[in-house]
Amino acid sequence: MSAVRCSSCFASPVGVAVRQPLARGGARGGSLAAVGAVGAPGKLSGGRFWAREQLRISRVRAAGEAEARPASEAEAKAEGAEDGGDGPSKSLIQMTNFSERYAKNTGTYFCSDPGVTAVVIKGLAEHKDTLGAPLCPCRHYEDKEAEVAQGFWNCPCVPMRERKECHCMLFLTEDNPFRGDEQTIDPNEVQSLTEEAKGAL
């Protein structure tokens, strides 16, 4: 079967001419006359076939654009970790970014000892991986799953949200003698500091 063609149409895999999608300016090329004029036996025809083909084409295009889109630095690090690279894991990057944002939003600071900050963020990331939520890593729990479901100690915990009291010393107020001057930390530094701490044990 030969497809009906026009200057702004292309042939679909089943031999039906499909009009080109919307251009960047919003103008369409070709006409709908070719669509539905020719159909594959036993297949959808007319408007239903057109709708299905447009959906298929949009999915293919979206997949191609996603592959071509340059990843952000954090996304690239996460992808490297998922591929078995030596960089920080995706959850570690996520919890580092969360900690930085929360410190800035609440006017709090990380500990003057960056090793403390790194160990806490690492613990949050591990709980996010194993429990599905960043349960506070600085407390003992009889049943971690039950604590996650309750939500009281999921970071930021209730004491932190209500009174700016962080048991882990991750978020410290200005009057805390152990606070540093930083509200940012690099995920690579978090990883290296936690690895050093493990090696010292």
Image: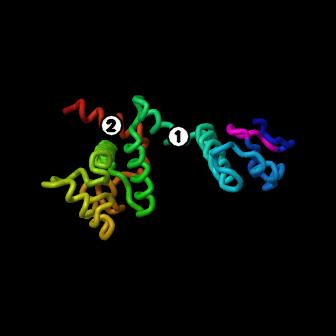
- As for residue 54 lying within the magenta part, the answer is no
Residue at point 31%, 70% (across, down)? 162
Whole-percent x, y for residue 110 in the image: 36, 52
Whole-percent x, y for residue 197 in the image: 26, 35
Looking at the rendered image, the disc whose residue lies closer to the viewer, 2 or 1, is: 1
Quarter of the image with the C terminus in it: top left
Whole-percent x, y for residue 96 in the image: 40, 47
Three-letter amino acid code at the position of disc 2: Leu
Q: Which residue is mark 2?
A: 193
What are the residue bounds of the magenta stretch? 9-15
Q: What SS does tag 2 mark?
A: helix
Three-letter amino acid code at the position of disc 1: Glu
Quarter of the image with the N terminus in it: top right
Residue at point 41%, 50% (across, down)? 182
Classify 166 as above or below 45. below
Whole-percent x, y for residue 167 in the image: 24, 58
